[in-house]
C-alpha cells in the first residue's frame, strides 16, 4: 500500500507555505536552519528535540495566512505580528503532534525585555527564533550582506544576550550565512528531515493542521474539508473500493483543496457568487495543489486530489479530462466535492436540502458529467452520509470555536505585557 512518509508530510507543508506569498519564499526554511545550527552549536538538546524544534522553526509563520499580516512580516520594523504568532501557536498546540513545542511559536516576536517576565520552558528557543527571524527578514528587506554583529546594540532589549552570542559562535563555526547564500543549507535541512518518524496519526494531524491554516477563519472551508473526507471515506467503502484505493481516496480528499492556500481571501470568502474573473482565479487552486503535491506524494493520491473538478464529458477543469481517463476513486471524489459543497452553509446561502442535492446530482449524472453508479449509491445512502459528516463537522466546529475563543484570550494577555 502506498504510504506518505514523514519527511514528505513535512515537505508538503513546506511547499504549501512557500507558495503563500512570493516575498516569504523559503523564509521558514532559512529561519528553521539558523535555529537548527544555533541548537547544534549549543549542544544542549537531544537529536529528537533538535528535529522537533527545527520543524517548529520551519513552520513558525504557519498562522500567517492572513494576507495583511504577510505584508507586515516582510517589513523589518513592525508591531502588528501578534495575530499570526497566536494562530501558529494554537495550530501547533491543538492540531499538531508537536503540541509541546507550540510556545516557541507563540513568543517568536516578543522582545526579550518582555519575554523575560513570562514563564515558559521554551523561552530560550523563542529567543533564538526571534533573532533568526529578524536576521532573515533584515536580509530580505535590505538585500545587503549580513554583518553578524548587526543586532548587538539591541542586546537585552529586543534580543537576549545568549541568543546573540550563540548566533555569533554558530556563525563562526558553521558559516550559516554563507550556506544560506549558496543554497547549500537546503541539503542539510533535508538530511535532518530524513530522520523524522511520525506515525500515521501524527502525519494526518500535520496535514489537517495545514488544511486548517489555509483558511482558518473561513469556517465554511474547514467544514467543507472535514465533510469531504467523511463522505469520501464512506462512499469508498460503499462502492467496494480496494483497501489501497480507500486509503488513496482518503488522502486525496484530505488534500483536495490544498492549493487554496494561494487563493486570495476576498475571493475565498466572497459573500456572493464569484464574477468570471474571480472564478478564473479560484479555479487555479487545482494547479496549485498539483504544484504542492507532485514531488512528495504518490501519483495515485495526487491525481485523486487534483481531478475533483473534472467531468466525465470533458467539461470540467483543470485539464478537461474525459470518462476513460477518470478512475472510480477520482469519480467518487468529484461527486463528494459537490455533495459537500451543496450541504455546507455559506455566508450567502443556507445548506441545500436533500431533495435539491438529489436533483442536481441526478441531472449531472444524466447529462454525462458525473458517474451514474456513484450518484445512485449516494442517493440510496444520502441520509447516513450527511448525518455522519455533520457529526464529524460538529466536533471540528467545536475545536474551531474553541481556538477562536482562545485566540482572543491570549491576544489580550500578550498585548497587555509591559
Ligand atoms: Fe513571524
Ligand atoms: Fe517569520
Ligand atoms: Fe476544489
Image (cartoon, rainbow, N blue to C red):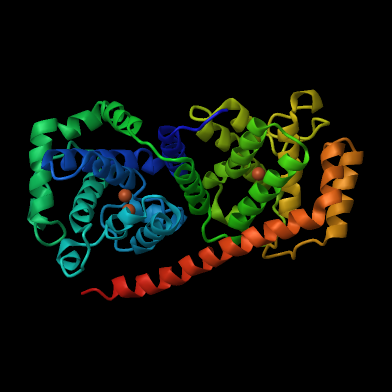
Q: Quadrant of the C terminus?
A: bottom left
Does residue 49 lie above or below 392 as drawn?
Answer: above
418 on left or right of 339: left
What is the x, y in percent for residue 357? Answer: 83, 54
Using the rendered image of the protein, determine whether residue 306 is visible from the camera's viewpoint: no
Q: Residue furthest top?
A: 324
- Measured from the top left, where is residue 368 in percent x and y? 88, 35
Residue 220 falls left or right of residue 141: right
Q: Please tell me in which quadrant of the rendered image residue 171 appears.
A: top left
The answer to whether residue 61 is left or right of residue 228 is left
Quadrant location of residue 93? bottom left
Residue at x-position 53% and y-position 33%:
293
Residue at the image point whose x is 25% and y is 38% from the top: 33
**Count of numbered marks:** 0
Residue under the image location 63 percent in, 45 percent down: 282
Residue at 69% x, 44% y is 232
Q: Nearer the viewer, residue 288 or 407?
A: 407
- Does 401 appear above or below 327? below
Amino acid at each position: 500500500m502506498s504510504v506518505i512518509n514523514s519527511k514528505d508530510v513535512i515537505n508538503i507543508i513546506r511547499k504549501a507555505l512557500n507558495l503563500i506569498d512570493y516575498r516569504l519564499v523559503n523564509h521558514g526554511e532559512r529561519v528553521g536552519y539558523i535555529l537548527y545550527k544555533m541548537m547544534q552549536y549549543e549542544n544542549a538538546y537531544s537529536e529528537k528535540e533538535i528535529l522537533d524544534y527545527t520543524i517548529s522553526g520551519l513552520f513558525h509563520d504557519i498562522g500567517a495566512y492572513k494576507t495583511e499580516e504577510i505584508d507586515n512580516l516582510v517589513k523589518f520594523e513592525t508591531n502588528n505580528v501578534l495575530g499570526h504568532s497566536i494562530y501558529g501557536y494554537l495550530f501547533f498546540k491543538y492540531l499538531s503532534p508537536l503540541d509541546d513545542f507550540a510556545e516557541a511559536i507563540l513568543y517568536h516576536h516578543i522582545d526579550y525585555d518582555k519575554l523575560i517576565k513570562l514563564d515558559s520552558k521554551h523561552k530560550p528557543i523563542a529567543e533564538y527564533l526571534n533573532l533568526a527571524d529578524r536576521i532573515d527578514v533584515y536580509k530580505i528587506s535590505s538585500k545587503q550582506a549580513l554583518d553578524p554583529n548587526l543586532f548587538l546594540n539591541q542586546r537585552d532589549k529586543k534580543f537576549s544576550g545568549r541568543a546573540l552570542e550563540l548566533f555569533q559562535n554558530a556563525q563562526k563555526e558553521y558559516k550559516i550565512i554563507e550556506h544560506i547564500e549558496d543554497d547549500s543549507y537546503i541539503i542539510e535541512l533535508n538530511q535532518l528531515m530524513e530522520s523524522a518518524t511520525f506515525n500515521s496519526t501524527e502525519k494526518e494531524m500535520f496535514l489537517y493542521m495545514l488544511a486548517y491554516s489555509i483558511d482558518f477563519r473561513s469556517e465554511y472551508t474547514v467544514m467543507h474539508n472535514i465533510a469531504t473526507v467523511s463522505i469520501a471515506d464512506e462512499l469508498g467503502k460503499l462502492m467496494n473500493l480496494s483497501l489501497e484505493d480507500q486509503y488513496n481516496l482518503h488522502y486525496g480528499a484530505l488534500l483536495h483543496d490544498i492549493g487554496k492556500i494561494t487563493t486570495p481571501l476576498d475571493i475565498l470568502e466572497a459573500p456572493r457568487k464569484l464574477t468570471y474573473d474571480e472564478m478564473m482565479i479560484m479555479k487555479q487552486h487545482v494547479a496549485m495543489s498539483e504544484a504542492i503535491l507532485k514531488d512528495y506524494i504518490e501519483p495515485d493520491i495526487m491525481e485523486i486530489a487534483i481531478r475533483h473538478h473534472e467531468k466525465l464529458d470533458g467539461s470540467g477543469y483543470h485539464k478537461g479530462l474525459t470518462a476513460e481517463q477518470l478512475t472510480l476513486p477520482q469519480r467518487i471524489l468529484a461527486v463528494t466535492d459537490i455533495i459537500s459543497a451543496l450541504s455546507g452553509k455559506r455566508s450567502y446561502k443556507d445548506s441545500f436540502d436533500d431533495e435539491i442535492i438529489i436533483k442536481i446530482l441526478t441531472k449531472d449524472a444524466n447529462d454525462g458529467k458525473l458517474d451514474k453508479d456513484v450518484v445512485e449509491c449516494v442517493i440510496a445512502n444520502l441520509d447516513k452520509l450527511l448525518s455522519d459528516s455533520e457529526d464529524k463537522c460538529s466536533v471540528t466546529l467545536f475545536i474551531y470555536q474553541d481556538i477562536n475563543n482562545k485566540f482572543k484570550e491570549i491576544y489580550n494577555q500578550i498585548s497587555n505585557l509591559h
